[in-house]
Image: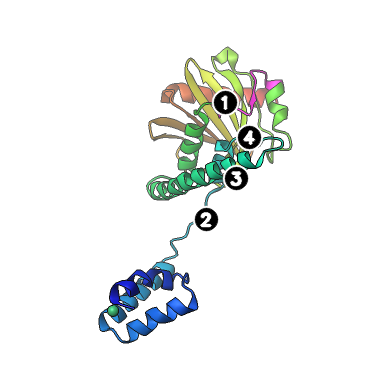
């Protein structure tokens, strides 16, 4: 084995990918070659440093949802060919999603993770066919749909008199938790309202600007509410006030 061959096999050796014969051959070469011994030693040090830094992040729940939403709905009885195509598509999406995780991790350093989840969920919802799981302007259809799907079914008041039309509801993930998303619209502006159990966003200010959207946050009755939209801040505040008042008045 010469130096070039040995160096080609050093990464696979350290990653445990070589069979015993090739692993031994690289080690024997390095024992008799100062340059390769130094190279192997420095790669070992690098590997130790990387392991010690614990650069592995668990994927957020929102990623699983995003992948599931992006995948085609399974056919009832897929042929082998369809199944294989589905697999290839799934693998491609996983690769795309994996690169997305990296971006999300970098971005969350600057932005609160909750805020980042809210913006991601809003953007995803604005993609075609992702806005609602239960498209309806009738609160009596939307509210019961959440029963049994989230810890506490959220209030779904009719705000049409205040100029906010109900579009429907959806499940989404914020802060690793499944939450209810209620969708309203004012003129052409979609408002996603996320209702999360607990004080998930207690460190968020009441109004925040994130990636061009206004995000309004408040809590009531032990739930956290986040409204996000490209509506201006004043109109989003009107929405929050109208929602709160109507939810309290109708007893949800
Ligand atoms: Zn060598």
Mark 4 and mark 1 lie on one chain; the one further toward the N terminus is: 4
Mark 1 and mark 2 lie on one chain; the one further toward the N terminus is: 2
Q: Nearer the viewer, mark 4 or mark 1?
A: 4
Q: Name the residue that disc number 3 marks.
A: 177
Q: Position of residue 131 (x, y in %)?
A: 56, 27
Q: Residue at x 69, y 32 (%)?
A: 146
Residue 80 or residue 53, whichever sits in front: 80
Q: Position of residue 124 (x, y in %)?
A: 50, 33
Q: In the figure, 159 relative to 93: above or below?
A: above
Residue 70 or residue 112, whichever sits in front: 70
**Does residue 247 belong to the magenta stretch?**
no
Q: Secondary structure at mark 4?
A: loop
Quadrant of the image occupied by residue 245: top right
Distance from Cα at disc 2 to Cα at disc 4: 26 Å
Q: Position of residue 103 (x, y in %)?
A: 40, 47
Q: Residue at x 53, y 49 (%)?
A: 60
Q: In the figure, 174 relative to 138: above or below?
A: below
Span shown in magenta: 129-140
Q: Name the residue that disc number 2 marks.
A: 58
Q: Position of residue 29 (x, y in %)?
A: 34, 82
Residue 74 or residue 49, whichever sits in front: 74
Residue 131 or residue 13, whichever sits in front: 13
Q: Are marks 1 and 2 in contact (CB under 8 Å)?
A: no
**Picture quarter with ligand 1:** bottom left
Mark 1 and mark 3 lie on one chain; the one further toward the N terminus is: 3
Q: Secondary structure at mark 3?
A: strand
Q: Which mark is residue 73?
A: 4
Q: Are marks 2 and 3 in contact (CB under 8 Å)?
A: no
Direction from residue 223 to residue 121 in the image, left or right: left
């Amino acid at each position: 084995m010469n130096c070039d061959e040995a160096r080609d096999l050093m990464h696979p050796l350290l990653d445990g990918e070589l069979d015993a014969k090739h692993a031994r051959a690289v080690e024997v070469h390095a024992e008799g070659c100062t340059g390769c011994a130094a190279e192997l030693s420095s790669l070992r040090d690098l590997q130790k440093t990387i392991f010690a830094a614990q650069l592995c992040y668990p994927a957020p729940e929102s990623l699983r949802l995003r992948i599931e939403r992006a995948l085609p709905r399974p056919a009832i009885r897929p042929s082998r060919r369809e199944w294989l195509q589905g697999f290839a598509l799934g693998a491609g999406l996983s690769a795309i999603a994996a690169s997305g995780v990296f971006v999300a991790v970098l971005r969350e350093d600057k932005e609160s993770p909750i805020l980042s989840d809210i913006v991601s969920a809003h953007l995803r919802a604005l993609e075609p066919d992702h806005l609602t799981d239960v498209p309806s302007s009738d609160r009596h259809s939307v509210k019961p749909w959440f029963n049994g799907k989230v810890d506490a079914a959220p209030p779904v008041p009719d705000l049409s008199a205040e100029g906010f039309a109900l579009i429907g509801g959806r499940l989404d993930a914020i802060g690793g938790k499944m939450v209810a998303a209620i969708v309203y619209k004012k003129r052409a502006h979609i408002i996603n309202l996320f209702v999360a159990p607990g004080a998930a966003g207690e460190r968020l200010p009441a109004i925040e600007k994130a990636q061009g959207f206004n995000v309004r946050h408040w809590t009531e009755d032990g739930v956290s509410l986040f409204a996000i939209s490209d509506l201006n801040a004043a109109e989003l505040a009107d929405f929050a006030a109208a929602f709160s008042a109507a939810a309290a008045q109708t007893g949800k």
